[in-house]
Image (tube, rainbow, N blue to C red):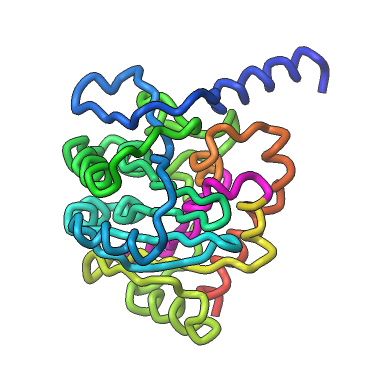
Amino acid sequence: MNKFLMVILSATVLSFCGCSGKSTEAVASTQGLEGQEISTYLLGDYVDVKNAKSKLENAGFEIIASYSPVKKGTTLVFTNEALKAEGVKPGKAHAAVLRLFIDEKEKKISFTNPVYFGKAFMQDKYEHAVFNAQFEAINSAFPGLKNSADKMKYDDLAGYHFMVGMPYYDDVDELGEGATAELLEKAKNFKKGKLIIFELKLSDNCFLVGYDLSKRTKKFVEKIGRANGAILPYTIAIEDGKATSMEAKYYIALSYPLLTMTEFTTIATVPGAVAKELEKPFKK
């Protein structure tokens, strides 16, 4: 590749990586989001798992999974009726859950920002009132949360991709086809169900399944940043006769918006490994 093409590529990558900065008080206005930078995560002082669960439940959330993506780290996956109502919309199942990563090593907590991931996953179906209500509920239950350095402009979230040639939200990995009940049964029976982290029913024809990855594959979290450990567990959407997952090149980049091309190349084999592992239950 000549120097001119390298310059163009570098500029493209930088335009999607954002920039770091000092954390500020977490804010999500109901108006004027256009042009604003939305933080990927909401950061706070350490709260242990037991107390975090209690705070979430008191705030009206249902905890559906407790999962360890890294050593001395726990992700709580949670939902409520409002999130489920959004997730049941066609192709939007991933928006039905939020996550809290509790880092017992670094003594910090990190929530997936409902506005950031809500806009990214709901695309043109995004209802700010719904996701801002989750934002406010989290902040009320956990006062003093700060914005993460990871962030992206609101305007870019719905059409996000890492760079030219990389996948968008709708460019999913198709894992299998068949009746919803049949696909769900395959996922639950593979390896006697040991890889299923949670099963969330959104309707008779729509399920979101939390799925464990192999130790080797999920090591990418430690490699590019355990602070964003809420990226796992990976999820599979089963609806309308198909089992699909978000393309890992999209989901990893969205969850690590400060990731550089150099850093991405260090985990170049991960997206393919994720797809292969998620396909296995449906190949039987």
Q: Quadrant of the N terminus?
A: top right
Is residue 163 placed above or below 204 in the rendered structure?
above
Residue 218: give x, y in percent of width and height: 62, 60
Using the image, determine if residue 101 lies above or below residue 216: above
Q: Is residue 136 magenta?
A: no
Q: Is residue 80 above or below residue 261?
A: below
- Residue 245 part of the magenta-drawn span: yes
Residue placed furthest toward the top: 4
Q: Report if residue 173 is visible in the image.
A: no
Q: Position of residue 103 (x, y in %)?
A: 51, 54
Residue pictured at 52% horizontal, 47% vertical: 228
Residue at horizontal 59 percent and vertical 29 percent from the top: 164
The quarter of the displayed image where residue 42 is located: top left
Q: Nearer the viewer, residue 40 or 270?
A: 40
Q: Which residues are magenta?
A: 223-249
Rendering coords of residue 253 (x, y %): 55, 40
Residue at 61 percent across and 45 percent down: it is 225
Residue 196 appears in the rendering: yes
Residue that appears at 38% across and 29% down:
38
Q: Position of residue 96 (x, y in %)?
A: 29, 55
Q: Nearer the viewer, residue 105 or 37?
A: 105
User: Considering depth in this image, is 153 or 159 the residue closer to the camera?
Assistant: 153
